[in-house]
Image: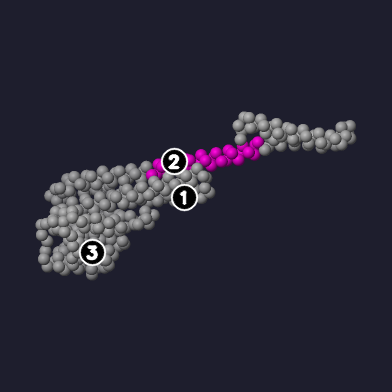
Amino acid sequence: MTSRSLLSTADGHDSSIRLEAWSRRGARDDELLWVDLEDPSDSELDEAARCLGIRERTMAAFREIARPAASVQDDALQIVILALADDEAGGAIPLQILLGDGWIVTRHDASIPFLAEHRDRIQDQRETGRLQPIEFLVALLDAWIDTFFRASERLEREVDALDDAALRTERDLLARLVELRRRIARVRRVLTPHRELLAELVRPDFLPERHGRGASGLDAVIARLDRAVEGFGAARDMLLGTFDVHMTRTAQRTNDVMRVLTLASVILLPAVVIAGVMGMNFKVPIFDQPNVFYIVIAVMLALAIGTLAFAKVRHWF
């Protein structure tokens, strides 16, 4: 297990502490403790619960990894969200968040990049200790939604690259289009269930006494979530446009091939007709003249050149 405990104070100071020290000294009004647990064992969860004073019933609910949801426990607020791995193709990682009096606990079974980024970001002179746990949750959810915006930007860049590939009619383009469409759909399936979760958080009957300063922040998070969902919808529409470009370019290439074949047939058809006529087994005096062979060849060439010149004038190629 990897355990990180960051204590932030109202004067902008941040320090790593041991949970045992926290349990002995207790919490102050100008402090906020963030405990991040990565792949903890049952005994390690029990130790964290003992140091933070979390009740057994609350911890029993916290041990379960579930779908995105929010619930109110005896002494804490529990939220479960799904976070993206390093690559959006890697699936989702459940992230459990527990908010108590002056502390917040995050638990996940695998590394989540945005948590490390958020931890580094808040370790400056910003006065994180002044935040209520619900306000810290808003900041954490904002950082979580940023990962979806970045994923959307990456996918849009890949769609732009596929546009160029579609114009070049690369042979493996269709497989790449299908794979990218699956990745977009996978991320959308991760993101969209959280609409119900955030809607639950802002309902008037959900912890009305705790919302306070965090209520407007939660509204802003919902608005950003909607924009993130729309961003993936735009990426999907762009991908459909790329597929149309691919199909149009393929049809154009087929038309070019058929044009060449048709022109070749038109050029050779007169010669084929003349050769067929001259090859008939009839006793005609003209066949007794050896020079007729060269005349026929010249006529064939003249017809072919004339047909080619006519096609050029009409811009058939």
Secondary structure at numbered mark 2: helix
> Which residue in the protein does label 1 denote?
176
> Which residue in the protein does label 3 denote?
4
| Residue name at image x 22 percent, y 51 percent | 139
* Magenta extent: 235-263
Distance, label 3 to label 2, CA atoms, is 46 Å
Query: Can I make out residue 9 in this image?
Result: yes
Q: Residue furthest bottom?
A: 43
- Amino acid type, label 2: Gly
Dot 1: few (<14), some (14–19), or many (≥20) neighbours within 10 Å?
Answer: some
Query: Viewer-nearest of labels 3 and 2?
Result: 3
> Which residue in the protein does label 2 denote?
241
Distance, label 3 to label 1, CA atoms, is 40 Å
- Amino acid type, label 1: Arg
Query: Looking at the image, is mark 3 or mark 1 earlier in the sequence?
Result: 3
- Amino acid type, label 3: Arg
